[in-house]
Image (tube, rainbow, N blue to C red):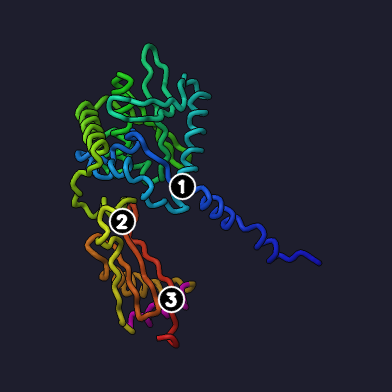
Amino acid sequence: MAITINEIIEAFDIRGAQDNYYENRKKRYASYTNRASSIGYFVPSLNGCQRKGVYERLNWRDKQLFDTQSYIRFEEGNRQEEHVLSDLKKWGFDIIKQQDDFIWEKYQISGHIDGKWKYKDIEPPVEIKSMSPFIFQKVGVYEDLNKESWLRAYKAQINIYMLYHNIEFGIFVCKDKSSGAIKPIVVEMDYQLAEDCLQTAEIINEHVKNKTYPDQINDHKVCEKCLYNHICMPDVEFGIPLKISEDKKAVQNIDYYLANKFKKKEIEHLWNDIIRPSIMAECDDEGRVNLILGKKYHITGKKDARGTFRSRIDLIGTEEEE
């Protein structure tokens, strides 16, 4: 029997194989220490939540799992790290003690340093951070790490490494995931932040010892992304509020737009001056939209990292079903 193109397409299902692979790798891990890479998410001065730090220690079995795309990003980040360390050594930098683990018993803090740069009589810790082109363009100095919550966590991580190893300098090596461009951010010890991290670790340790929890914070943006919000705030509904509209004219506009979307000149005005503004008018205070329109379309959207509003229109019904 002859092999058909459809059979080849079905058999070489990369997306399905990828999803199955990462689905089988999803699991929760016990956390017996405060991880240096995570502690920045718990430090109040970095807009962190100490309660989450206790959940990581006491309630790790309840942690919601990341989605498949997140696991793909994590693995790609590990690959980027390996390539950058290899390149640094190839370019003449004396990178030592790669993947060096430590446990700071006094504060129950554990860390995993990508490597150290042997320079004269010092060995600054080196951390590899791959990032999107947009974030790569935004960061160039230490102060730029205040711009996102996960960038602020980087600050805590490197300062813990420096304090533990009693050295006043550290280095982030940032890599643009798209172009491959690389640049360093040299960090000088931030003693106040380091102290904040240690105090946070002590507070978490005390709660873990007593099996108690710090007070909840009141920050919807932080709580919405927390993988413990289902046990911390079980009665709070997170996500973009759903709206429902029966605007028939809006449905007709989208019908026409989708039917003629390849006629760019013909529908450009319709999208830019009518449909897009009407969608944005349905946004919540954070610039997000989650709209069911005429029982026919599901419209979602929000601003991307550049501040540009992006939306998506999915067909969920037909006129006959309405």
Give whichever of discs 2 and 3 has the lower sequence position. Answer: 2
Q: Along the line of sight, which residue is nearer the eye, 62 or 187?
A: 62
82 relative to 285, above or below: above
Q: Hey, what amino acid is under mark 2?
A: His
216 relative to 79, above or below: below
Q: Hey, what amino acid is under mark 3?
A: Ile
Q: Which mark is residue 27?
A: 1
319 relative to 226, above or below: below
Quarter placement of the C terminus = bottom left
Does the magenta portion include 154? no
In the rendered image, residue 62, in percent from the top left (x then y), is placed at: 36, 50
Q: Please, which residue is most extreme toward the right here?
A: 1
Foreground disc of the pair 3, 1: 1
Q: Hey, what amino acid is under mark 1?
A: Lys
Report the magenta residues as a range.
249-261
Give whichever of discs 3 and 1 has the lower sequence position. Answer: 1
Identify the residue under disc 3.
Answer: 316
Going 41% across and 51% down the picture, which residue do you hit? 65
Whether tag 1 and tag 2 are in contact, CB under 8 A, the answer is: no
In the rendered image, residue 184, in percent from the top left (x then y), is placed at: 38, 30
